[in-house]
Image (cartoon, rainbow, N blue to C red):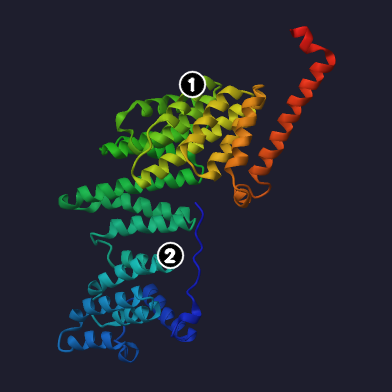
Amino acid sequence: MLLTTLSPPDLPSRTIDLSFRTAVRTFLMLFLLGPVSGAASDLDSHLAPAERDAQGAFGDASLENQIPAMIAAAERRWFSGEHDRAELIFAELLSLPVPLEKKREVLLQMADLFEQTDSSRTIIILEKFIQAYPHDPATSLVLLRLGKLYRAQGAYEVASARYFRVLNTTLNVGADELEMVREIATRARFELAEMLTEQDRLDEAAEVYRKIELLDLSSEDRMTVRFRLACVAFETRDFESAVDAFSQLREDESIGPYRLETSYFLASSLKRLGRGREAFEVVVDLLRSQLSNDPANFAQSTYWKRRTGNELANEFYQQGEYLSALSIYQSLARISDDPEWRWPAVYQIGLCFEHLELPERALEAYQAMIEGIPVEEADLINVDISLRDLAHWRLDHVKWMLDYGERFRMMTGSIDADS
């Protein structure tokens, strides 16, 4: 998984100078890395009227009762794009001379907001939460969240340590919390196995999945484990095991969201075992399946149909199995009217007809492309040379071959001899 690099805030749009903002962030970092202490600072000069009014409304109340109103004020600033002002309010909240447990929600809200722009500071905040509230009911979820954040940054060893800490939390919870913690622990096991897969530590990933399989799982989680184990077999080139696993999954009516991917991996495994006819049947069955009416599912279904059909058709074509390749390309051309998808498939159909020595049918394919692709859109199909130009070239080539063949037969007397 590639780590997404987030752009820094747009400095010209800020109303706060850089040195002051840096000072605020330094204050936050010092707080988070050390004990919570210090008296309230003079926030009034930095607050907008709305925040001053909110604070004034609680003038006679205890400092603890002001915390929710100040959190709400910080949230308003954050969601209006004034992140620096929001951080000032959070800094004030963290410096309030109140017991540490009263600042629990402040830390969690800061983590939620900061995660949108700065995962590193989110990690610092959540680590402080774990340090400050080791027995909090949210500890397991926070550890799981930390594991994901470290994993996204490529800090796999630290992420692994956080996942194992999640597993250990099940040892020290009461009966009323056990079910929830077990569910979180299961999620941590899945995250750990997926992380090992990312690192190509496939044998270790398979071992974790097998241990997960022994747990009391929901039907969805059990299906996920079976699918992941089959994928590991595929990635380790154990195609016989992969075929067995994916075949069983494909026959299971509860396969759910893995149905399309299962067909892809099954067809690919069969092809690698030299069982081309079976692979072809799987692909054709997939391409004939009904597309979902749900937009999200429709997009996913179309993606896997295209990927499966295209990869297998290309393999058949490269191996000289033009009839099988032709059948798949024809099915692919019918999936979508999108020109960037349809016309490349039609072009491949033309090539297959040429190899099958059906030049008239090839001419039909190329002519359809020339008539169907507007000149002004031709260059949008391919970055190097437009498919329309390629179709023109193939059309002229096939016509020349037909004309040459006709003239050759006339010169050699083949026509008279045949008659």
- Is residue 183 rendered to the left or right of residue 196? left
Going from N to C along the chain, the mark reached first, 2 or 1, is 2
Q: Position of residue 121 (x, y in %)?
A: 42, 69
Q: Amino acid at mark 1?
A: Glu
Q: Which SS class for mark 1?
A: helix
For the residue pair 175 and 384, the one nearer the viewer reads as 384
Residue 140 x %, y %? 29, 56
Q: Is residue 91 left or right of residue 310?
A: left
From the viewer's perspective, is residue 263 above or below residue 176? Answer: above
Q: Is residue 143 visible?
A: yes
Q: CA distance from mark 2 to mark 1?
A: 47 Å
Mark 2: give few (<14), some (14-19) or many (20+) Cα within 10 Å.
some
Name the residue beneath numbered marker 1: 278
Instruction: Name the disc covering residue 219, or none.
Output: none
Q: Which residue is mark 2?
A: 119
- The residue at 63%/40% (across/down) is 370
Provide residue 158's location: percent of width, then percent of height.
44, 56
Q: Amino acid at mark 2?
A: Ser
Residue shown at the point (39%, 31%) measured from the top left: 289
SS for dot 2: helix
Residue 2 x/y as whole percent: 51, 54
Vertical order, 229 against 178 (above or below)? above
Q: Nearer the viewer, residue 294 or 79?
A: 294
Seen at 44% across and 54% down, the residue is 151
Which quadrant is home to the C terminus? top right
In this rendering, the answer to whether 126 lies above or below 229 is: below
Residue furthest right as drawn: 411
| Residue drawn 30% across the image and 29% down it | 253
